[in-house]
Amino acid sequence: MQSNELILQLQQKNEKAFQRIYEMYAENIFGVIYNILRDQNLSEEVLQDVFIKVWNKADSYSEKKGRFFTWMLNIARNAAIDKTRSVAFKNSQQNQTADYFVDILEEKSNFSGKIDAIGIKKYINVLEPICKKVIDLLFFKGFTQKEASEELDIPIGTIKTRNRICIDKLREVLAV
Amino acid sequence: MNIKQYISSGILELYVYGALSEKENAEVYEALKEHPEIEEEIKEIEKSLMQLSAASAPYNPESVFNRIKDKLSFTNNEVDVIPITRKRTNWTAYIGWAASVALLIGLFVQFNKNKDLRQQVVKSQIDQILLEGKINLAEENLSKAKTLLSVLRDKDILQIPLQAQKIDPTAHASVYWDKEKQTAYIDVAGLPTPPPGKVYQVWSLKLDPLTPTSLGILDTFNENETKIFSFTNTNESEAFGITLEPEGGSASPNLEQLYTLGVVES
């Protein structure tokens, strides 16, 4: 969970605080990056760049702009999307068939201790196809509501509430 | 504001996603500052999304951190929270262990030294006690010898040699009798060591008729180095005799075991 004191220490260039933050968020950010790139080496490269940016630009974060997690999420998605324009990425995607984060979850067998693996697996089983797409676009890929409504061909007014229902379901199985 | 409706609109999910416009974002920030329930809801959404995104990672990228550290040229001892504390603990631990070992060795050496010194002290004390005992003994012997010497030199003392009898022709003894002080000194250096269970008994005798009176038994014959015994003698003795008697002495002398006999010359 977000600790304002930890973030303050990070902004004061406290290396320990930075490590703490890495330990808290690296796996999440890596998940988001990997969901976009679907390549472990490239994802690690991007993860590295993201955290270097987090260290260098920590000053630019402000609580007023949003959650710290959201701030890092934005950096990560932008960095990952930048990477999709690279030759390396294009070469890596030749045999790529998976589209959604769900595919990763379905293939994945070993979860780290931070994750409620049973809850997550259960969630995939009950997840409606539209939820997979909505969460994938809005959360993992950082689409705006407008972009998502166009991509999914559903009215912009229903995106928000639909997503809410999808996340509610996730919270239900994770008991959050 | 209807908070429930606000929460269920789904705007908070988009807030965590970062999918809102700047204006909407600012509105949510105002709302969460005002209503703790909204902030609480945001935290819970974030928590579930962190689970979901972490689950989407192929593995926990812990190892990448070392590369980041290198890129940022972190002074290694500041970054690694766990290794660092370990390192620091290690240093203190090393120093601690070294100090402990040194202390132990020191203590051991001191302990041994202490033990040696104590042993020396004890030995010295024993030696001292022994020496004191020897000195006391020597002083005692000296005073005894002086007393004896004074007895022998005293002109008022009667010297009565006791002659050997049939039972042992080599046996002899002497009585030095101080009539005034009513003390008789018996020198029995010339008597053989009594057999076990037997003891010499000294008698004062009146000759006419023969009346023996016991002066005492020489039950410390073996222990007395000078072999000179002193007895109180209040008798008008006319002779002295020494017989061998059963342990504890007898009421009257066994004349068959008479070893020495001497008559007082008057």
Image: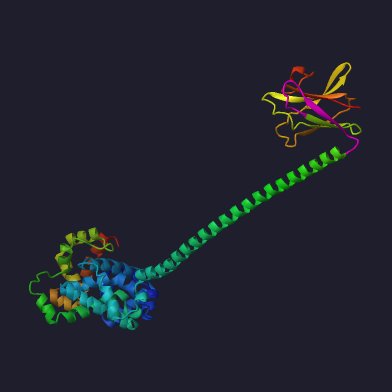
Would you identify the image quadrant in which residue B186 lies? top right
Would you identify the image quadrant in which residue A13 lies? bottom left
Residue A74 seen in this snapshot: no
Give the residues in magenta.
B154-172
Q: State whether residue A84 is above or below residue A97.
A: below
The furthest residue to the front: B169
Along the line of sight, the residue nearer the viewer: A106 or A109: A109
Along the line of sight, the residue nearer the viewer: B8 or A147: A147
Residue A6 seen in this snapshot: yes
Q: State whether residue B105 is above or below residue B242.
A: below
The residue under the point 70% across, 26% down is: B194
Q: Is residue B102 left or right of residue A129?
A: right
The furthest residue to the left: A94
The picture places residue B116, in percent across and down from the top left corner, at: 56, 55
Give the colour scheme of this rendering.
rainbow
The picture places residue A117, in percent across and down from the top left corner, at: 23, 60
Task: Tell me how many marks there are.
Answer: 0
Chief SS of the magenta region: loop
The picture places residue A7, in percent across and down from the top left corner, at: 36, 76
Q: Is residue B71 magenta?
A: no
Picture quarter with the C terminus of chain B: top right
The residue under the point 19% across, 67% down is: B58
Q: State whether residue A121 is above or below residue A41.
A: above
Q: Is residue B161 magenta?
A: yes
Would you identify the image quadrant in which residue B193 lies? top right
Picture quarter with the N terminus of chain B: bottom left
The residue under the point 77% across, 46% down is: B139
